[in-house]
Image (cartoon, rainbow, N blue to C red):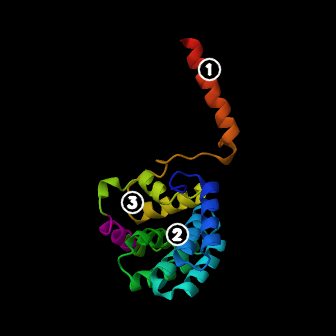
Amino acid sequence: MDIARKRFDEAISSAEKSILIAPNEYLANIAMVHVLTCVGRADEALKYLDMAMRLDPRFLDTILVEKGKASFILGEFEKAVAFIHRGLTLNPALTNYSSFEAASYASLGKIKEAENAWNRFVDGFQVREYLTTKYLYDFFPFIDHKIFDRFIDGLNKAGFEGNPSDYYKVDKKNRLKGQKIKELLFQILTRVIQRR
């Protein structure tokens, strides 16, 4: 929930607590992977994927596609394609990772392969009218907008028709923290009361 709300610090804290409570739990490690990839720490995420693999190798399909997503974030597109392809071979139902396969192929200049991967993603997508840049950002909310921009650029080359700028970018320097938010809310409430 914290990732979906773009509360990245809280998400990291929750994932760390999960690992502390259940360090040998496969899903706790996968949750940490998702958080770390969203906050741009994909190199660390790979370590948790290795741990998840040791804990429960039955989920090799998920581990491989997550390694592909982490590789995409790191700019290692050949690795991304290889990992995702292997994961999808084991479990073709993981079509949401075909989006990263498509973006990786596009980044490599392999447009036909990118289009094929994009079509697999679209075929597995339930409600196509929701397939917008905003939806994709809600689903893959990377803290580093350059990564998301690269992702959307690749998808556009693969056949996605969404506008790359249709999501909200907040520069780090413009993000407000707790005390500043409280001060601004107090100012607004004070003005509202004064007008009455």
Q: Residue furthest front?
A: 21
Amino acid type of the residue that numbered disc 3 sits on in the rendered structure: Phe
Residues at discs 1 and 3 in contact (Cβ within 8 Å):
no
- Could you say which is closer to the camera, residue 102 or residue 169? 169
State the extent of the magenta-drawn residues as a range. Answer: 116-125
Distance of label 2 from label 3 (alpha carbons):
14 Å
- Could you say which is closer to the camera, residue 14 or residue 53? 14
Which numbered disc covers residue 107?
2
| Residue 115 relative to residue 41: left or right | left
Residue 39 appears in the figure: no
In reply to whether residue 121 is colored magenta, the answer given is yes
Residue 32 appears in the figure: yes
Q: Which residue is mark 3?
A: 160
Picture quadrant where residue 38 is located: bottom right
Residue 124, position as x, y percentages in the image = 32, 69
Question: What's the magenta bit mostly, secondary-structure-wise?
Answer: helix
Q: Which residue is mark 1?
A: 190
In this view, 36 is above or below 49: above
SS label for mark 1: helix
Distance of label 1 from label 3 (alpha carbons):
46 Å
- Could you say which is closer to the camera, residue 38 or residue 105? 38
| Residue 195 relative to residue 133: left or right | right
Residue 61, position as x, y percentages in the image = 45, 82
SS label for mark 2: helix
In reply to whether residue 76 is colored magenta, the answer given is no
